[in-house]
Amino acid sequence: MTEINPVTDLTLEGDVAVVTLNSPPVNALSAAVRDGLHQAFRKADADPAAKAIVLICDGRTFIAGADITEFGGAMAGASLPEVQDAIEGASKPVVAAIHGTALGGGLEVALCAHYRVAVPSARLGLPEVNLGLLPGAGGTQRLPRVVGVETALSMMTSGRHVPAKEAKELGLVDELVSEDKLREEAIAFAKKVVAEGRPLRKIRDQNEKLEAAKGKPEIFENFRKANARKFRGFLAPEYNIRCVEAAVNQPFEEGLATERKLFLELMSGPQSAAQRYSFFAERQAQKIPDVPDDTPTIPVNKVGIIGAGTMGGGIAMNFANVGIPVVLIEVKQEALDRGLATIRKNYERTASRGGITAQQVEERCALITGSLEMESLADVDLVIEAVFERMDIKKDIFTKLDAICKPGAILATNTSGLDIDEIAAVTKRPESVIGLHFFSPANVMRLLEIVRADHTSKEVIATSMKLAKKIGKVAVLVGVCPGFVGNRILGQRQREAQKLVMEGAMPWDIDRVLYDFGFPMGPFAMSDLAGLDIGWVKEKSKGESIRDVLCEMDRRGQKTGAGYYDYDENRNAKPSPVTEKVIKDFIVKTGANPREVSDEEILERCIYPMINEGAKILEEGKAIRPSDIDVVWQNGYGWPVYRGGPMWYGDHVGLPKVLAKMKEFQAKMGDQFKPSPLLEKLVAEGKSFKDL
Ligand code: CAA
């Protein structure tokens, strides 16, 4: 064996040279990896004893992409195109042997090999779009030549990781090999290629699949139209599409040049910077300074959930989806039956769209059993309480849980803002109590706020973080405070949105500004969707707010065909003259003085107080780091990924500007806008949140 460099080995196995990469954790294409590959391929190519070359990786995966940490800096060592030329231009067959994931630059390297084999569990994809980028190493030109234009467009704009079996059907993989025999079967495959005298197949020369799309610009236009909603606001999908157009309309080398130009444009732009930041922010959030990776965890093999409503049912599905049995507790049989029926209906809907099989529906439903007895929770490892937001009810439940549950069981509450220390205090085991705040719909939304109370043990935190990953959630650890991180910040935006209406902006003006900023919908459209009557009590309503008046008129949102907006039979929203009159009458009644409110003011009034509240949260230690707040807002509240999150956005607008505006608003409107001391301090020191 020859060590080419610390991350690359070259061995000769019979007459096959094997290049092995070993650069944990994911064999990303760092300078050392590129150099190692470059040298190893040149050496293997020059060795007359080697008749073919296999490229394989040690560890958990094939090359998972370019090394994102190197982006933005100067590139050292061999360039990726140099490496690719050495592979594609080799004078003997090169076989890429794939396990784990071949992603981004990893797949682009594999596409330069003359053949590809993979184990069945491998996945292949070009996920650059999720980093606000496009595959910048020939992927946009080679992929459509292999899988065709339409499939390439869909793979590149979704970033989907295609399973090996499908990749084989698409022609991306030539042969599937046994799961635990990748190395030997890849070598055998290489020998077969040599023995059969198969050609050095270069994807760059294959144009047949492109022919079908030549002279048909409508393919691209239709694709753009069909996905307009999904791509709204993002630059990268459009740039990926343009590259595939170039693959069809330009010769290979020119296509590469177009790809390069568009790649560099994206790479130097603000969207990709925000999206790359988000990638690392999500991973950073998993690191808890005083809860090291080796903290012991509690096995969770059975879960209990109290409350079979929308929230409880959605939470239950998360566990059933990964094979963990759930006992769902309700007080009345009727509510339990309704909850279980809703779960079944949700699974059946997923199955009808092809998401899961009919058999999986049955398996998952069978994992969720119902009970009217809290005693059924005696043997569960984790209980999640998901009942009304009333402290007295929660305390009662936790007192009972303390008596019923086995020692060491985790007792969690799904409260969205109540004091978890107060709940924990009714038990004799506050160390086992934690907040697991899911977001509705709980089976869909990715965010899980994990709320650490004063006495929560490290084991319980570590277990919760690990479990979140298992059920596909993005977990963020936060501290106890009213509304925790997400809802506390949301409160700022909601307050300002309501005030702005009283000052003369219409709900649809505010919604439009926030929608154009990139949110999926504005606060008033959101209220209409959720129902204006959440928390509204008809008997007690005295027309004291615009919401009260609308509810009294039975304008309770989409479900009644009207709320802030009017809705047609397809639930399309229109600004409502009725609501406008209600607002104007209300303003007259309260003696307010309406005025012209600019779009700029709407944005600053809604967003800057959120940034300021984030700073207060950091000051109080309720979030570990600014990027955790951004992860919460992206995954729980639809903050556009290409704007990073409130804290990232604050840094990029410039904290001096945010501070100056907060002071201006404070002088005009009072202490709701009082700048946080942290914001003042950062500005005084010329720093930003990223310096914390
Ligand atoms: N560069 C640098 N570091 C990377 C990385 C990359 N491409 N991919 C993953 N990592 C790091 C992560 O930051 C993480 O580090 P820490 O342990 O220090 O937090 C570690 O590798 C493990 O990653 P995950 O926690 O995500 O592990 P996982 O097993 O859940 O997922 C994965 C593995 C599917 C490969 C996932 O990490 C992933 O999706 N990575 C990004 C893949 C990607 O986007 N590739 C394209 C890169 S851009 C490109 O290639 C441009 C081009 O055209 C040349």
Image (cartoon, grey):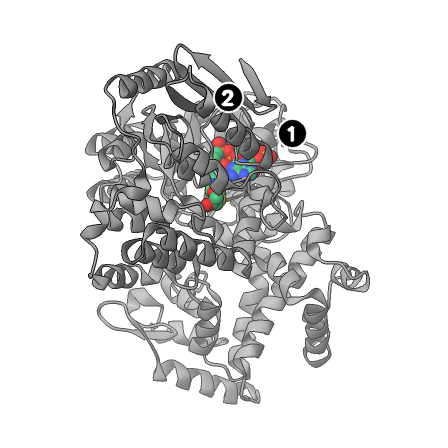
Q: Report if the beta carbon of the residue with label 2 is closer than 8 angstroms to ligand 1.
A: no
Left or right, 604 with respect to 555, comes to: right
**Whether label 1 touches label 2, CB < 8 Å:** no
Q: CA distance from mark 1 to mark 2?
A: 14 Å
- Up the image or down, 475 lies above or below 609; here it is above
SS for callout 1 = helix
- Up the image or down, 653 lies above or below 9; here it is below
Q: Report if the beta carbon of the residue with label 1 is closer than 8 angstroms to ligand 1.
A: no
Left or right, 398 with respect to 322, comes to: right
Instruction: Look at mark 1 in the image and give the residue it sits on.
Output: 458
Which amino acid type is marked by label 2? Pro
Q: Residue at x 40, y 10 (%)?
A: 14
Which percent across, then down, holds residue 259? 42, 54
Which amino acid type is marked by label 1? Lys
Which percent across, then down, holds residue 123? 36, 33
Left or right, 358 with respect to 74, comes to: left
SS for callout 2 = loop
Q: Nearer the viewer, residue 102 or 386?
A: 102
Can residue 95 be seen in this snapshot?
yes
Q: Residues within 10 Å of mark 2 (few under 14, many from 20)?
A: few
- Up the image or down, 256 lies above or below 527; here it is above
Which percent across, then down, holds residue 184? 37, 13
The numbered mark at residue 299 is 2
